[in-house]
Amino acid sequence: MYFHCGWAVGQVGSANTLVLPTLIRAVRKSDGWSGLTLVPNLLYLTFGDQKITQHMAVADLSDLQRNVLTALYETEALWTFGNMAFAIGKFFEPLVSMRRPMLGRKGLGAFLANQNESFQRSPF
């Protein structure tokens, strides 16, 4: 039983290296409607249960994680609805002043630019 579970987990990991670049390209062609389904799934495949904390820098992420977050930030059409801030925010540790995890495009851009001070003050 353990052999099969370990093998299955290994297969998912190797599949991610093939699937994720395709999903990143799909995100870059998405809009707010399709992004509401695609983005949370892409982030889950990329981060799993990992949360980005206030004390992390973009350098702490893998190349793939940085590429995914950069694609999300650069694809302006994804941000049509405020819901995208909740979808992305689930993968960031909530700020002390917030009850729900939420991260807008401006906050994601600040994080990617290593402006952690701006990111912590203005997540939107």
Image (tube, rainbow, N blue to C red):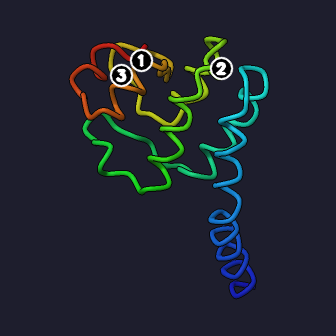
Identify the residue under disc 2: 77
Quarter of the view holding residue 122: top left
Quarter of the picture holding the N terminus: bottom right
Q: Are marks 3 and 2 in contact (CB under 8 Å)?
A: no
> How far apart are the two marked residues, 1 and 2, measured between alpha carbons?
14 Å
In-image side of 46 versus 104 (left or right): right
Residue in the foreground of this view, choosing between 57 and 74: 74
- The mark that comes first in sequence, 3 or 2, is 2
Query: Badge 3 local density, few (<14 within 10 Å), some, or many (20+)?
Result: some
Query: Badge 2 local density, few (<14 within 10 Å), some, or many (20+)?
Result: some
Q: Position of residue 88 (x, y in %)?
A: 55, 30
Find numbered disc 1 in the image and state the secondary structure of the residue it sits on: helix
Find numbered disc 2 in the image and state the secondary structure of the residue it sits on: helix
Instruction: Identify whether 32 is placed above or below 72.
Output: above
Which residue is at a point 51% across and 37% down the rendered structure image? 91
Quarter of the picture holding the C terminus: top left
Identify the residue under disc 3: 95
Which amino acid does the dot numbered 1 rest on? Answer: Lys
> How far apart are the two marked residues, 1 and 3, measured between alpha carbons?
15 Å
Query: Badge 1 local density, few (<14 within 10 Å), some, or many (20+)?
Result: some
Q: Position of residue 111 (x, y in %)?
A: 34, 31
Identify the residue under disc 1: 106
Which amino acid does the dot numbered 2 rest on? Answer: Ala
In-image side of 110 versus 70 (left or right): left
Q: Position of residue 77 (x, y in %)?
A: 65, 20
Instruction: Identify whether 79 is placed above or below 111.
Output: above
